[in-house]
Amino acid sequence: MDNDKKIELHIPSTVGSEKEAMETAAKVAKKIGFSDDRIEDLKTAVSEACLNAIEHGNQMDISTKVGVTLTVEDSSLHVAVHDEGKEFGGLLKAIEEGLSAYWKKEFPEDPLERVYIACFYESSKHLHLHIVPRPKSFKEDLHLCAKACSGFEEIDKRSQSLYGWHIHLATKCYQFPNRYLRDEGKSKKLIEFLKTKLPLA
């Protein structure tokens, strides 16, 4: 991929290093036309993700690095943050690979383009994982939902940009594809499949 479309950073696992990632993301976002409000939101998200990786993933180990990858696709910016925490990092990779394998099996006509995984620590023993799959068809589906339904107030009206994080809003719209709506049977099937793929104790 061209250097203009992909930037990789490797920052030290020390508090304060996240500022380099924040400023780099802000510069890229400004270059592709993000509004000031969206840039501030992006900086906050990048900061929180980097601090999670520094403090919890790498345990403040100065011998480790936090990797930050910024990828530009058309007018969208995707930011991925990676730590060197072996156990947790391996689990996230297994989740992504397991979900991708499930999607390929159940929806071969609509491959996954990306899996979003957001981690939120409430304490050293309390972790939230939000996992959002984004298949190829969702770009068109999300735009249909945005035009047909309310609840998309958070979307930048100037650029009409839509992201994987808007999927939970789209599921409430009548335009959303029925094949992807959650039901008890589908949920159990996915859970049982993931159990065969994850390194569970």
Image (tube, rainbow, N blue to C red):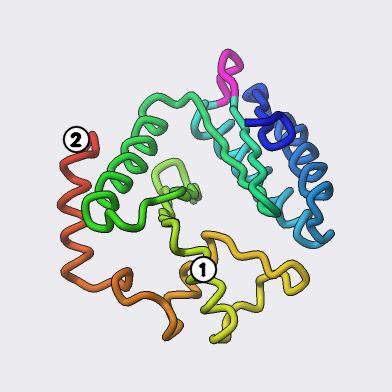
Q: Position of residue 157 (x, y in %)?
A: 73, 74
Q: Would you say the residues marked 2 and 1 are in contact, meaning their CB atoms lie under 8 Å apart?
A: no
Q: Which residue is mark 1?
A: 140
Q: Is residue 109 above or below residue 157?
A: above
Residue furthest out toward the front:
109
- Could you tell me which secondary element the residue under label 1 belongs to? helix
Q: What amino acid does circle 2 point to?
A: Ala
Residue 32 relative to residue 155: left or right: right
Q: What amino acid does circle 1 point to?
A: Glu
Q: Residue at x 58, y 25 (%)?
A: 60
The rendered magenta stretch, by its main secondary structure, is classed as loop
Q: Position of residue 81 (x, y in %)?
A: 57, 36
Check the picture and name the quadrant holding the C terminus.
Answer: top left
Q: Is residue 165 above or below residue 124?
A: below
Q: Which residue is mark 2?
A: 201
Residue 97 relative to residue 156: left or right: left
Stretch in magenta: 60-65
Judging depth in this view, the residue of 95 and 104 nearest the camera is 104
The answer to which of marks 2 and 1 sits earlier in the sequence is 1
